[in-house]
Amino acid sequence: MTLSVAPFSSMDTSTFSSMGVGSGLPLGSLMTQMQTNENLALEPIQSQEDSLNAKISAYGKLKSAVSALQTAAQTLSSTGTFTALKTSVTGSAFTASAGSGAVAGQYSVTVDQLATAQTLYTAGQTSNTTANGTGGTLTLTLKNGTTQSLDLTGKDTSLNGLVSAINGDPSLGVSATIINDGSATPYHLMLIANKTGDQSAVTSISSSNSALQSMLGFTQGTASSVAETAASNASVHINGIAVTSQSNTLQNAIQGVTLNLSAVDASPSTLSITHDDSQITQAVQGFVTAYNGLQSTIQSLTAYNTASQSGSILTGDPVALQVQEQMFGALNTVVSGTTTYQSAFQLGLSTDPTSGSLTLDTNALSAALSSNPGDVQAVLGGTSGLGSAFQTLSTNMLQTGGLFSNASDSMNQMMTDLQSQYTQTSDRISADMENYRQQFTALDSTVGQMNSLSSYLTQQLAHL
């Protein structure tokens, strides 16, 4: 909603300095003064532009405050605000979080076993830098059926080189490191599955490089030079029902709930899933903050200083007054069909009669939630509740064809008219100044010629 009027650019006043040289008249200074006087006609237009730009900026602040209230109203009217759940757990064997689909309830959970990752390690080697044969391919097969190959052609096949090559290919499903046990053959190549659970375990390793095959050849369940610490699956009992998992994060073992296992505990822990009223309180408080922010913005933009008898940029502005009146009116939204509560003012909201600001009595809201949560949801978040009323009102104000859009169109047209007026006035001044310049130039020339003739006649008369 911003248009800028180009600054006036008439003829350069420095060109006036040469005028009057022939005549000796102060024509240059006269032209400069005339230029200054002519430019005074542009100042009222520029002043109107400055005022209009200030008003555009003020509307931007007002629109931003309405948008913030719209967002707060959307949160307040969201079903998720009133269906949010929280979890609490006795003991430290696991933590839990409730998401979409979870329902309130209480569960007995026993963590019998944690999921672990498979570990494989070779027999001790005397060196970690000596090559183990040349090139070849290393092939790993996992229990989940995937097979991955690592091409070692032209690569370092020492233990250090193998660690670098294996860790450089995450598709293999394992990570490598070297363990030094301090013995005469201290270096063991260790492979650790990247994921927990038996499905991510390596079932076989083979290589076309005979040296690597001798050192790393492995088939699960058969004897080889590679030792295995087997992977394990997580195991829990939920209300007596056995549940297993490939990882220590169990999703939807209880519908909509995520369990994060951290320790084995033979004693059952109690998981409680309850309604999270704090989400409702936060949403209402967020609405109060946004509403008060809008009121504060309106007051600062429309304030009138009685001492100096001066107003602010939007003092008496119909758009600002309309926003304030409609928003205040929406606070009185009344919901029908409820049994105990019909208005937000019955749930702890109140307005300051002087400033118009909202305050929230959280104790009153908590009491209402305890006694009749259904009514609270209907009044605050229902389809005809407070949040919905403010969401609809703010959307209507902000949408194309709404209050701010119409005001924007009007000011854009005013700015365009000012641009045209400024350009026309500037062009007229330029034409007038050019006319003056031509007249002064002719005057300078005529007076110069007369001065020259006068000087000549004076000289001739002096010789008589």
Image (tube, helix red, strand yellow):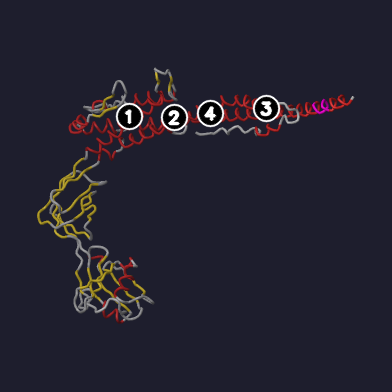
Question: In this view of the protein, can residue 282 be seen by the observer?
Answer: yes
Q: Are marks 2 and 4 in contact (CB under 8 Å)?
A: no
Q: Residue flagged by tag 2: what amino acid is it?
A: Ala
Mark 3, residue position: 31
Q: Give the range drawn in magenta.
A: 451-455
Where's residue 396, x and y in %? 41, 31
Where's residue 228, x and y in %? 20, 72
Front label number (2 vs 1): 2
Q: Do the residues labelled 2 and 1 touch (CB within 8 Å)?
A: no
The CA distance from mark 1 to mark 4 is 31 Å
* Element carrying mark 4: helix
- Which sits in the foreground, 166 or 35? 35
Asked if 144 appears above or below 321 in the picture, the reply is below
Residue 452 lies in the magenta stretch: yes
Where's residue 386, x and y in %? 31, 30
Q: Residue flagged by tag 3: what amino acid is it?
A: Met
* Residue situated furthest front in the rendering: 463
* Residue situated furthest left in the rendering: 267
The label shown at residue 292 is 1
Q: Residue flagged by tag 1: what amino acid is it?
A: Asn
Instruction: Write down the quadrant of residue 114 in the picture.
Output: bottom left
Q: Residue flagged by tag 4: what amino acid is it?
A: Glu
Mark earlier in primary sequence (2, 3):
3
In the rendered picture of this protein, how many numbered marks are placed on residues? 4
Q: Are marks 3 and 1 in contact (CB under 8 Å)?
A: no
Question: In this view of the protein, can residue 402 be seen by the observer?
Answer: no
The CA distance from mark 3 to mark 1 is 57 Å
The CA distance from mark 2 to mark 4 is 14 Å
Mark 2, residue position: 58
Mark earlier in primary sequence (1, 4):
4
Instruction: Write down the quadrant of residue 223 in the picture.
Output: bottom left
Front label number (2 vs 3): 3
